[in-house]
Amino acid sequence: MARTFVAAAAQLGPIARHEGRVPVVARMVTLLHEAKARGVSFVAFPEMALTTFFPRWHIEDSDEVLSYFEASMPGPETRPLFDTARDLGIGFYLGYAELIPGRSGLNHLGYNTAILVDSAGNVTAKYRKVHVPGNAVPDASLKLQHLEPWYFDDGNLGFPVTETMGGKFGMLICNDRRWPESWRMLGLQGAEIVALGYNSPSQLPDNPAQNALRKMHHLLPMQSAAYQNGLWIVATAKAGLEGGCHMMGHSCIIAPSGEVVALSATDGDELLTYRIDLDATQEYKRFFDFKTYRRPEAYGLITQRHE
Ligand code: CDT
């Protein structure tokens, strides 16, 4: 892939609780064909793109819990996505729930994971979500349960940056975008483009004062991160009314200047594109010049303590 290419956020609308992967993969394949027609070389799909966002429920049927996890990637139902992308010469980022072999039961079955697949169909990198938000045990008193730490272990692969498809690619997942440390870990490794999928409720019924600020709180940390680390961001939502909870759209592509250069217009399946020049990162990387100006000797608290 060249240093200049068209990237896309392939936003997905809602997925029903018992929908199964086959129709979802068909929707993703449709988006890949649209991407090809629009000259796209790299597509970012959402976090946990293949199923509904099941951590919004305390599920008491272990077979149902297991049904949301991928035992292999690709598996029989996701193979058409990989084959289509390879045939079209498109690389992609895909978020999914990764089963830890041998795990079963009601909780702690695996990781909230994303992979990079290059345009020849090879899985070139894996990331497991580090900032796993929500409540670690079911709490029926909450208006909105968000049980990611109940279902998932913390990611254990650090923050990889991978040279692939002509650039330095990083990955993050949803809540990671709110933490400057995630971006700095990628920026320090020279990341030029970061793909990030998310499932973010439009409203926080337990923190209603933030409701009107949700979109700002989504864009603000990413615009800062793009500028402060000199990198492109392709951020992709699973959006719309899913399982009774409205999920924010606002998928976007953000330039190293911090400007939002593409933004979704709907809460459904939608492809938004932008021609990215990876060398446009250089001006901002030179401006901040980490080697000259960063003072890690003064930043000790960041790794010594939580708060
Ligand atoms: N998927 C994910 O990480 N969502 C979180 C919601 C936390 S609110 C309970 C987010 O940061 O958008």
Image: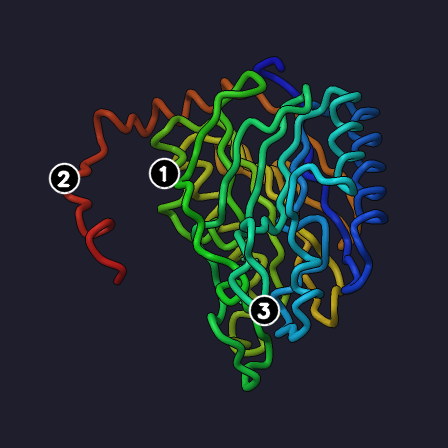
Q: CA distance from mark 3 to mark 1?
A: 33 Å
Residue 17 numbered tag: none
Residue 106 numbered tag: 3
Q: Quadrant of ligand 1?
A: bottom right
| Quarter of the image with the N terminus in it | top right
Residue type at the position of mark 3: Leu
Image quadrant in which you'd find residue 230: top left
Q: Is residue 268 left or right of residue 72?
A: right
Residue type at the position of mark 2: Glu
Q: CA distance from mark 1 to mark 2?
A: 16 Å
Residue 297 numbered tag: 2
Q: Is residue 199 left or right of residue 301?
A: right
Residue 59 position in % (x across, y down): 65, 72
Q: Nearer the viewer, residue 223 or 37?
A: 37
Residue type at the position of mark 1: Met
Q: Is residue 25 left or right of residue 155?
A: right
Are the residues flagged by discs 3 and 1 in contact, CB closer than 8 Å? no
Q: Which residue is mark 1?
A: 185
- SS category of the residue bearing label 1: helix
